[in-house]
Image (cartoon, rainbow, N blue to C red):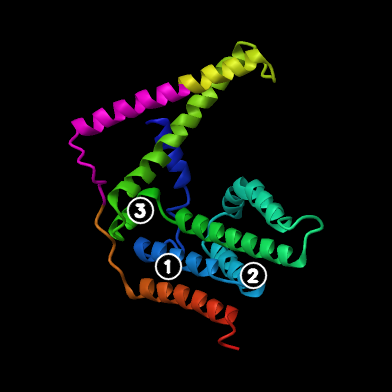
């Protein structure tokens, strides 16, 4: 079993749990999730954005995914989110204006909501099920294949980088801001890129030898039942209500 397969299994650890989200048909679940995220992006005021985040958090808590699983993935993006928030808040200079703070808060709430929704949706089904759903939703085959290969081999690239770092440490290499370190880092990146290109060529030849024709292999879709449709309609109705509240149409 390759390293990439090990990481894929780790990513799918909680896909076998049982919850209303796990039982949701993947195509409708992804479509409803994307519709919810698009609707959140259309919100223009803080209160509906806070409500959307609350809905996303409640859905995540009801998915039976461990809270640590969700929080760890949110923490990966916390530095970028914090940097974006500070940059937007100070867009008009120091001190930040009230409008700048509101805008920064609104964008941050939207980003956090979208991340929570996507982490929850992807965590409640296997990667293969997600890719099958994208293919059955008539997404072009090239992006689907690119997503799978990128997810599959980014871990191999990371493992090779870690192995190289361990090799440098074993040779008593101490990085620093000097010519020797920069030369070593340049050689390291060049070697990694050459290894990646060589590996990609070997993978392409192996896939071609097995009759690969450019189309990803997808399984037959699951049968859509009434609960699946009800969940999708409830998701769309929720974001529709929030948009109407945001526009001041309902009240």
Q: Quadrant of residue 224?
A: bottom left
Mark 3 nearby-residue class (10 Å; few <14, some 14–19, many ≥20): many
Q: Quadrant of the C terminus?
A: bottom right
Dot label at residue 129:
3
Query: Seen from this angle, which residue lies furthest right?
Result: 95
| Residue with the mark numbered 1 | 32
Q: Earlier in the sequence, mark 3 or mark 1?
A: 1
Q: Position of residue 226 (x, y in %)?
A: 34, 76
Magenta-highlighted residues: 192-218
Tag 2–tag 1 contact (CB < 8 Å): no
Q: Nearer the viewer, mark 3 or mark 1?
A: 1
99 displayed left or right of 66: right
Mark 1 nearby-residue class (10 Å; few <14, some 14–19, many ≥20): many
Q: Is residue 245 one of those drawn in magenta?
A: no
Front-most of residues 31 and 185:
185
Q: Quadrant of residue 139?
A: bottom left
Q: Position of residue 167 (x, y in %)?
A: 55, 16
| Residue with the mark numbered 2 | 50
Q: Is residue 164 above or below residue 146?
A: above
Q: Position of residue 189 (x, y in %)?
A: 51, 23
Q: Position of residue 238 (x, y in %)?
A: 51, 76
Q: Main secondary structure of the magenta part?
A: helix
Q: Earlier in the sequence, mark 2 or mark 1?
A: 1
């Amino acid at each position: 079993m390759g390293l990439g397969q090990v990481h894929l299994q780790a990513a799918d650890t909680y896909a076998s749990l049982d919850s209303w989200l796990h039982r949701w048909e993947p195509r409708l679940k992804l479509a409803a999730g994307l519709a919810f995220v698009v609707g959140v992006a259309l919100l223009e005021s803080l209160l509906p954005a806070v409500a959307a985040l609350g809905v996303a958090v409640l859905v995540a808590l009801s998915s039976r995914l461990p809270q640590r699983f969700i929080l760890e993935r949110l923490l990966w993006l916390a530095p970028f989110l914090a940097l974006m928030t500070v940059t937007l808040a100070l867009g008009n200079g120091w001190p930040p204006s009230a409008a700048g703070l509101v805008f920064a808060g609104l964008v941050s709430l939207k980003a956090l909501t979208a991340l929570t929704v996507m982490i929850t949706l992807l965590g409640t089904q296997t990667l293969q099920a997600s890719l099958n759903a994208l293919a059955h939703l008539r997404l072009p085959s090239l992006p689907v294949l690119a997503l799978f290969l990128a997810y599959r081999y980014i871990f191999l690239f990371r493992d090779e980088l870690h192995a190289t770092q361990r090799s440098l440490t074993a040779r008593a290499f101490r990085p620093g801001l000097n010519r020797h370190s920069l030369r070593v880092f340049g050689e390291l990146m060049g070697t990694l890129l050459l290894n990646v290109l060589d590996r990609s060529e070997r993978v392409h030849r192996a896939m071609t030898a097995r009759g690969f024709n450019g189309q990803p292999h997808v399984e037959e879709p699951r049968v859509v039942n009434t609960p699946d449709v009800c969940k999708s309609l409830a998701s769309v109705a929720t974001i529709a209500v929030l948009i109407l509240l945001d526009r001041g149409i309902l009240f």
